[in-house]
Image (cartoon, rainbow, N blue to C red):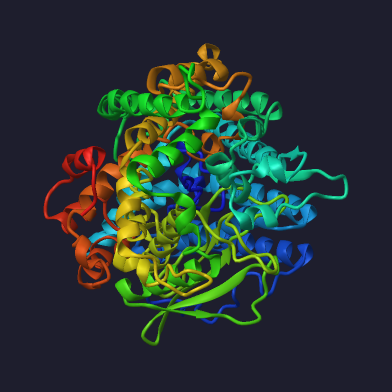
């Protein structure tokens, strides 16, 4: 999507709740003790039922509390060993409980297991909230003697103390109690918002195969009439994307779009209002004018004002060209409807595909045969293995939460770097977007990183090759980029500097960078092979695909600008001034040339309004950086590991051990700029 990226187990609550987020918990641990937990059971192996799962996670929280008690019991001089080390242990175990419960509440097929996981997630985040507001712990860390400490330890303490202050630790006791109560309430509201989206998996029925005219044959074969004679089509990605792009029936596209844009409605209207209200209340207590001011305080962008300026800046880059693109959509529609003056949102993908066929000689259906699910999955593993110098090994007979889930090890030579799960197909009650969920944050000398990739891709059914849209391939690579960032960065000395614990508005850039391999002929030909003949995708087809993709790019980016604007406007003013329907309408009018679909409430199914809250601009901000990072690579030789390994060492391996701007500067040997992004927006053909 990521698209979304909900990268972690728990719903992030922003800068003031930094200690609640799944990116990092302020903690630290030296490498010398205890021994690494590399031999620990693979997640879920020892907790297959609700009782075992509860016992395991409650045990993590007890261990965390015991470590915290040791820290607070110290008398005399505060040192790295007697303060940062036990604090790291406390936070890491609490983090494990939060990550693992958050994953299970999002993916487990049993609703009762998901309910228990929600309770455990609340308990873990309550522990972390209390920790973040514990003035005694703050004072202890502030008193640590850093004489002779290395740069990582100094940065850890600086970052940790800042996050404590952002969380409100410097407020009086009564205020801290109020902050804690608000945080606990926000956790539950966020869970409700996400649950309403997960559980609202809608379908439409059509009368016959005639209604599927234009759709690929494999799609039609997979959608035969049921006992009632009707054909059911889901709003989930494997159904929705092909229907919106290929179905000749406008009525079918319109009906499916309507249901998709009303996902979570009406339940989430009131839930979103409560999220906005409570976040504003928390921000005011913490001393910020709005939640947007609060949540941007620890990001690269720094302030909500700068976020607004950035959104406006990108908007000016794309809106005029988006209007030009839109006129071409109208012209295309007039070939079928001579009196047409507008193209609606449920028609954009369809007419965009027709334009790319007629003007760019590219038919999106023609490449689906090269992207069978199993081939793409192996391609993701093979390409990343080659460019980053690692190997992947399937863990046979691993205990998993659903039979479709697979487990893997990732190794560098003989060294085990981490482990991960792939949960890649839709099912009822499952998180319905695409994301990487951390399971265990890596910490050198303590435990290896583990993560899960959760997507909703085609395939996974008997006799179904799972032919993917190219956009699905891009999503797969994107999310796997998050997973690699978690694993490669999971060997820091201190846990809160590990994995993807960098600033949140940089965290999408490494995943966006990995998408570039999906557009490169040599990379694609290494795995994109016709599922019937074995023929690699021709280079000239890839070139056509790239040229076709350049069309409508400004229109697509303008949609991202609108989402960024919507996200920020919901949170950059008092709740009394917010009507979410009006904010959606305003963002649409300002940045999109096509009309808003009547009687829809997109915000109710926009999960990022919980996890990302006001900072959806992250995707565009990261993309500006990503395009600059990619300027260092040779597009003609992307499978050569030389530059990817230099990039891995400079950025991925270092996790959050330095501010993102420093990591970027180390790789680019300069500050990042907008030049490559501008070129991307104006690109008419690919190299």
Measured along the vertical axis of the image, is residue 100 above or below residue 431?
below
Q: Nearer the viewer, residue 524 or 395?
A: 524
In the rendered image, the residue lying farthest to the right is 227
Question: Can residue 286 be seen at all in this image of the molecule?
Answer: no
Left or right: residue 461 compared with residue 332: right
Which residue occupies 54% across, 70% down? 374
Q: Position of residue 364 (x, y in %)?
A: 45, 50
In the rendered image, the residue lying farthest to the bottom is 414
Q: Position of residue 601 (x, y in %)?
A: 61, 25
Which residue occupies 73% across, 53% down? 114
In the rendered image, the residue lying farthest to the left is 669
Which residue occupies 40% across, 25% down? 331
Q: Nearer the viewer, residue 677 or 547?
A: 547
Residue 524's image quarter?
Answer: bottom left
Question: Can residue 209 be seen at all in this image of the molecule?
Answer: yes
Residue 632's image quarter?
Answer: bottom left
Measured along the vertical axis of the image, is residue 158 above or below residue 200?
below
Q: Position of residue 368 (x, y in %)?
A: 49, 58
């Amino acid at each position: 999507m990521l698209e979304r990226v909900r990268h972690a187990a728990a719903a992030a609550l922003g800068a003031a709740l930094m200690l609640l987020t799944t990116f990092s918990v302020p903690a630290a641990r030296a490498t010398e003790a205890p021994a690494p937990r590399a031999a620990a059971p693979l997640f879920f192996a020892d907790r297959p039922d609700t009782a075992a799962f509860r016992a395991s996670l409650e045990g993590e929280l007890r261990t965390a509390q015991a470590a915290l008690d040791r820290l607070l019991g110290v008398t005399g001089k505060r040192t790295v060993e007697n303060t940062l080390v036990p604090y790291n242990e406390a936070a890491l175990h609490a983090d494990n409980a939060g990550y693992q419960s958050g994953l299970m509440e999002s993916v487990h097929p049993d609703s009762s297991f998901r309910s228990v996981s929600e309770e455990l997630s609340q308990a873990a985040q309550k522990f972390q909230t209390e920790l973040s507001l514990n003035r005694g712990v703050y004072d202890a860390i502030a008193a640590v003697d850093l004489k002779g400490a290395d740069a990582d330890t100094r940065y850890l303490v600086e970052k940790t103390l800042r996050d404590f202050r952002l969380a409100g630790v410097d407020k009086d006791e009564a205020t801290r109690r109020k902050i804690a109560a608000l945080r606990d309430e926000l956790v539950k509201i966020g869970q409700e918002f996400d649950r309403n989206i997960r559980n609202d998996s809608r379908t439409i029925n059509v009368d016959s195969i005639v209604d599927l005219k234009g759709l690929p044959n494999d799609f039609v074969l997979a959608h035969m009439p049921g006992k009632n004679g009707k054909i059911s089509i889901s709003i989930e990605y494997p159904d929705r994307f092909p229907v919106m792009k290929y179905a000749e029936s406008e009525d079918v596209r319109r009906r499916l779009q309507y249901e998709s844009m009303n996902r979570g409605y009406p339940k989430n209207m009131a839930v979103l209002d409560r999220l906005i209200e409570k976040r504003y209340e928390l921000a005011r207590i913490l001393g910020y004018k709005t939640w947007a001011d609060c949540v941007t305080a620890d990001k690269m962008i720094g302030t909500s004002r700068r976020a607004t300026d950035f959104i406006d800046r990108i908007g000016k880059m794309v809106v005029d060209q988006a209007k030009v693109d839109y006129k071409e959509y109208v012209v295309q529609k007039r070939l079928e409807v001579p009196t047409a003056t507008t193209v609606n949102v449920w028609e954009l993908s369809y007419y965009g595909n027709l334009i790319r066929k007629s003007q760019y000689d590219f038919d999106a259906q023609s490449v689906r045969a090269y992207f069978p699910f199993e081939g793409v999955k192996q391609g993701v593993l093979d390409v990343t293995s080659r460019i980053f110098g690692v190997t992947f090994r399937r863990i046979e007979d691993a205990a998993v939460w659903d039979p479709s889930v697979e487990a893997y090890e990732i190794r560098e030579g003989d060294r085990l770097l981490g482990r991960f799960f792939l949960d890649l197909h839709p099912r009822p009650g499952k998180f319905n977007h695409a994301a990487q969920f951390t399971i265990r944050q890596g910490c050198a000398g303590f435990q290896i990183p583990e993560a899960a990739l959760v997507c909703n891709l085609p395939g996974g059914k008997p006799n179904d090759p799972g032919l993917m849209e190219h956009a699905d391939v891009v999503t797969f690579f994107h999310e796997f980029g998050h997973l690699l960032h978690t694993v490669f960065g999971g060997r820091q000395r201190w846990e809160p500097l590990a994995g993807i614990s960098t600033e949140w508005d940089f965290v999408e850039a490494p995943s966006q960078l990995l998408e570039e391999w999906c557009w490169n002929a040599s990379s694609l030909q290494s795995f994109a092979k016709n599922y019937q003949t074995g023929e690699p995708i021709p280079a000239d087809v890839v070139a056509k695909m790239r040229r076709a993709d350049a069309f409508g790019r400004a229109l697509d980016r303008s949609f991202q600008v609108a989402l960024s604007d919507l996200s920020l406007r919901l949170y950059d003013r008092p709740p009394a001034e917010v009507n979410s329907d009006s904010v959606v309408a305003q963002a649409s009018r300002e940045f999109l040339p096509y009309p808003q679909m009547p009687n829809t409430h997109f915000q109710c199914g926009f999960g990022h309004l919980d996890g990302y809250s006001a900072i959806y601009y992250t995707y565009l901000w990261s993309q500006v950086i990503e395009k600059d990072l990619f300027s260092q690579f040779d597009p003609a030789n992307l499978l050569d590991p030389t530059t990817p390994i230099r990039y891995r060492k400079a950025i991925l391996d270092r996790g959050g051990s330095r501010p993102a701007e420093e990591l970027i500067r180390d790789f680019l040997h300069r500050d990042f700029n907008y030049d490559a992004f501008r070129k991307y927006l104006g690109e008419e053909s690919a190299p």
